[in-house]
Image (tube, helix red, strand yellow):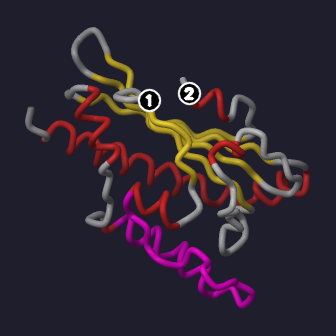
């Protein structure tokens, strides 16, 4: 799994899986084209996060405060970093920030080739993937795993409080994403 290369050691992890009756090629395309703008639940969850950011009196211009519901928007507009794609097997993203802050404290200046070695105390590094594992029966198990490494105590304690609150919602969004990928991949024509 390519995710191990980018973040082998971590403090927190969230993993979800789904079985899809499709090919790795169709699933890879469905993940790449993922668009959750039609999901009412996702709009509400992202809207709450955006509201929290907008209510912060110290927010900087350009803070994440609008809805981002496609994988491409996530990469292009929020500071998530496209780390790697292994065709028809895995897509890996990364992000560095102080996620407990209203704006997310995202460092948008981190390049993909600097992500692995980033080690500034007080920040967290998170990497997130979609992994496709073909099964003998013709189905594919698709998993998504989010790993978070806290860089020092100044990051670990606030992130622990944040994670305690956000984890159920984070898991819910991952499940919604996997279901959307399943629907799309199983509906794609040959």
Q: Quick check: marks 2 and 1 in contact, CB under 8 Å?
A: yes
Left or right: 22 as drawn, with respect to 39? left
Q: Which residue lies furthest to the bottom in this view?
A: 57
Residue 185 place in picture, x, y as percent: 21, 38
Name above or below for residue 20 compared with residue 121: above
- For label 2, count other residues whose C-alpha is less than 10 Å away and answer few (under 14), some (14-19) or many (20+): some
Residue 173 place in picture, x, y as percent: 44, 54
Q: Residue furthest top?
A: 136
Q: What stretch is highlighted in magenta?
A: 41-70
Label 2 – label 1 distance at C-alpha: 8 Å
Q: What residue sits 52% from the left and 57% below the top? A: 169
**Which circle's residue, 2 or 1, is located before the other in the chain?**
2
Q: What element carries label 2?
A: loop
Magenta-span inclusion, residue 84: no
Magenta-span inclusion, residue 68: yes
Q: What residue sits 35% from the left and 25% below the top? A: 141
Left or right: 180 as drawn, with respect to 62? left
Quadrant in the picture for the C terminus = top left
Residue in the foreground of this view, choosing between 96 and 140: 96
Q: Mark 2 points at which residue?
A: 2
Quadrant in the picture for the N terminus = top right
Q: Is mark 1 on a helix, strand or loop?
A: strand
Q: What residue sits 38% from the left and 31% below the top? A: 142
Residue 13 place in picture, x, y as percent: 64, 39
Name above or below for residue 97 compared with residue 134: below
Return the mark for residue 103.
none
Residue 154 place in picture, x, y as percent: 90, 57
Q: Mark 1 points at which residue?
A: 86
């Amino acid at each position: 799994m390519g995710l191990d290369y980018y973040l082998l050691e971590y403090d927190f992890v969230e993993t979800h899986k789904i079985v899809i009756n499709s090919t790795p090629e169709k699933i890879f395309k469905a993940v790449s084209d993922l668009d959750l703008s039609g999901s009412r639940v996702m709009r509400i969850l992202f809207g709450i996060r955006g509201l929290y950011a907008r209510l912060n009196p110290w927010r900087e211009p350009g803070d994440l405060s609008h809805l981002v519901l496609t994988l491409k928007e996530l990469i292009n507009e929020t500071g998530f970093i496209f780390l790697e794609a292994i065709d028809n097997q895995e897509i890996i993203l990364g992000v560095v920030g102080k996620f407990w802050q209203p704006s997310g404290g995202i460092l948008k200046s981190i390049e993909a080739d600097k992500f692995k070695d980033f080690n500034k105390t007080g920040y967290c590094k998170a990497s997130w993937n979609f992994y496709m594992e073909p099964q003998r029966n013709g189905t594919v198990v698709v998993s998504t795993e989010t790993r978070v490494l806290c860089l020092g105590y100044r990051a670990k304690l606030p992130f622990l409080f944040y994670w305690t609150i956000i984890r159920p919602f984070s898991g819910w969004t991952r499940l919604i994403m996997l279901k959307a990928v399943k629907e799309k991949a199983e509906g794609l024509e040959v």
